[in-house]
Every structure is written in C-alpha cells, then in structure tokens.
Amino acid sequence: MNWFQRINPAWFLAGAAFFLPIKPAPVNLLLAIAILFSLINSECRQTIGRLFTRVELVPLWLLLGYLALTFFHPGNDESNYSEFISKYGRLFLIPFLASILINPENRYLVGKGFLAGMGVVLALSYAVWFGVDPSYFGAKATDMYAIPSNPTVFKSHITHNFFLVVAIYLWILSIFRSEKLLSKLIFALLTLLALVNLFGMIDGRTGWLVFMVIPLYFGYQKLGLKGFVIAGVAFVALLVSAYFLVENVHDRFSTTWLEVQQVLQDKPQQETSIGERVMYLTASWSAFINAPLFGYGLGGIQAAVQPFTSAAGWPPFYNPHNQFLMLVLQGGLLALVLYIWFFGVAVYRSSQNTWSSTYVLPLMMFYLVGNMLNSFHFDFAESVGFLILYSAYLGSAK
C-alpha cells in the first residue's frame, strides 16, 4: 500500500462536518474528496459493494427509483424535478460514507469535526450578540440574521437551532464520558453557553421542540415510561418558567399565541410562520386527497397546490415545510411508506446496539421532529447532516 492509499478519507469527512454549520461550498468539496479516497482506500473499497446490498437500504433504493420515475408524471415540472432529484440523490452516497465510518475512531473523528464547527459558530454568535460586525466573519447582516437580536451568523435560525441541539446532546455525553475534570468543565461550559444561545438569543421555535427529545430520551433511558413522563412534565414546567423569566422565550410565545389566534379566526397571515404553515398544511392536504396513491411527481407540487392557494389569496409554493407532506405530494402514500420503512428500520435497529442507541437513535428522533416542521431533505445542511448520521449508523451496524 503506497502513501496515497494510506490517506484516511475520514479526515476529509471530518472537514465536511466542520463546515456543515458554516458554508456549503467546502462541504461539497470535502465530501467529494472523502468519497474519492474511499474508492482509493482498499479497506473502504472492499466494503462499499456489500453496503449497497444491505437490507436497510432496500427501501431507499426503491424510493429513489420510484421518485426518479415521477419524471414521467403528466403534472411534473422539469426544472423543479431536477432540483429535487439532485437533493434526494445525495442519499445515494450513504454506502460510500458508511465504508469510511465502519471504523469507530473515524466516527468519533467526524463527530469532533462537527463539534469544532459548532464551537466556532457558537463563539461567533456570541460575538455578534455583543455587537461585533459580522462582516469580519464573512457573514452579512440582514433584518433577520447576523444581528444582535438574532445572532445566527451563517445559517437561518432554524438550521442554527437544530444543529445547536445536536451539539448540546453530544456535549452532554462528553461531560459524562470524559475522565479528566478539566475536560468535564469545558464541556459543561459549552453546554451552558449553547443552552443560553438556544433559548435566550436566537429566534425560532423548531430548536426548542427538537430539544425536548433530549430530556425525554434520558428520562426513558433511566426510568422507562415513568421517566419519559416525568421528563416531559419537567420540560414543560421549565418552559413555563422561562416564559416569565427569559425575554426571548416570552416574546416568541407571545408571537405564537397571536399567530394562533389569527388562525382560529380564519385569518392566517402570510408573514407569520404559523400562518404560513397552516396554509401549507391545508393546501397540501387538499391536493393530497385528489391524488393520494402516487402524488404529482417531484416537480408537481406547485401546480398541485395552486388552485387552493389562489382561492385563499396566497402565492403557490413547492416546499410545504414538512418532509412528510412533501413526500406524499411528490409520490403519494407509496413514497411515504417507503421513506418510513427506510427511516424506521434505522430507528429500530439502532435501538438494539449500545453505540448507535447512544449516538444515532436520539439524533434520528431529532430529525423525526424536525421533519414535521421543515423539509430537511430539501435544505442543504440538514440533508447532508442526515446523510452522515445514517452512514454512521450503517457503518456501526453488523
């Protein structure tokens, strides 16, 4: 084996994980290099073919093949089809990345790369919050982003909060698994800073809902169903307390209640997140019941919902901000069943393994909750994050 073949592709995958919450261009480049070196590395190359035939991926291949065939659907828009097929097509890379992540040391290396990137993002978020000009970091301030009242720096608040929850969970694990007192203190400080950032500084409620998985998971792990219920009650109590004590939480809940009242009065507002999601839901459901089995094709969502959005005086959309709604519109119940099969197998099997039940299962639950509020296979950073997560599961599973 020459020196070129000895290069560890996990180095580049760790680099991609580092840039995941920062910039997309380095992520794409480093992913490509990681895959190239997985083909050069003899150990990885020997396992890639076997990974393609793993039973967990059977529903994925069926799903991708079926979604590709929706090109011939009469209502399909070719430009939208091309955009979606390229996004779903990233899932094809799972066996290549899983061949890299079979090695436990490589999995931890990639995890450390992600946490290092989140550490940078967290530090810069605090810098913007304290009034530092974000242009120094290559970020542009807008009315919503990279400003002291919402210091997200590189990503939207939804992406920032979601990845922050992932980092909080991994930092909590690091507190308990580190042997040195100094390391425990550093991880505890990072966790505290991240919690303040999540609940006290950044807009968006998606991260708060996803965060709820953490206490529920730990409660269930310790005390079973009883612990699950106790953790849920405790989390709600803490949110109620935060409503009265934390300005950011108070403002977001007050806004939520106002938006809910507008919806109850049949006056959902276009510029509010809840109002928009209600319209996404109602228009998507109306379109779905007209084509429940096979949907409208990858590029057919906009045309399918337009009659219903126009009747309500709303603009059409092609992203319902719910991954499950998106799949039933694009491929009907057949696409949804195949996706749930693919997702569910990983959830069930990861719960049977000590490593994956600790490092994969909770993060899969993060994605389950997140996909109810957004279309994470459409959004770049979240979709690549899922790609790495599923690859880590597949690489760790026997």
Image (cartoon, helix red, strand yellow):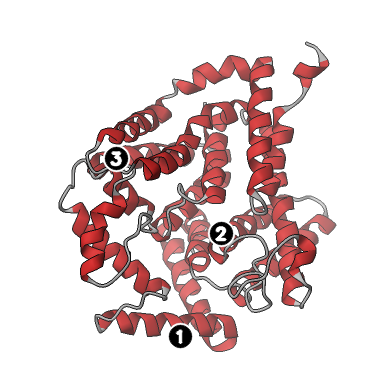
Marks 3 and 1, the one that precedes in the sequence: 1
Q: Please give the residue where the numbered disc 3 appears in the rendered image.
A: 335
Marks 3 and 2, the one that precedes in the sequence: 2
Figure quadrant of residue 315: bottom left
Q: Is residue 33 visible?
A: yes
Amino acid bearing label 2: Thr
Q: Please give the residue where the numbered disc 2 appears in the rendered image.
A: 159
In the image, taking residue 231 as reference, residue 119 lies left or right, namely right
Figure quadrant of residue 354: top right
Q: Please give the residue where the numbered disc 1 appears in the rendered image.
A: 254
Element type at mark 1: helix
Rendering coords of residue 139 (x, y %): 70, 63
Residue located at (66% from left, 51% from top): 23
313 above or below 39?
A: below
Furthest residue to the top?
1
339 above or below 213?
A: above
Amino acid bearing label 1: Ser
Element type at mark 3: helix
Neighbour tally class for label 3: few under 14, some 14-19, many 20 plus, Cα within 10 Å: many
Rendering coords of residue 222 (x, y %): 52, 56
The total number of labels drawn is: 3
Mark pair 2, 1: CA separation: 22 Å
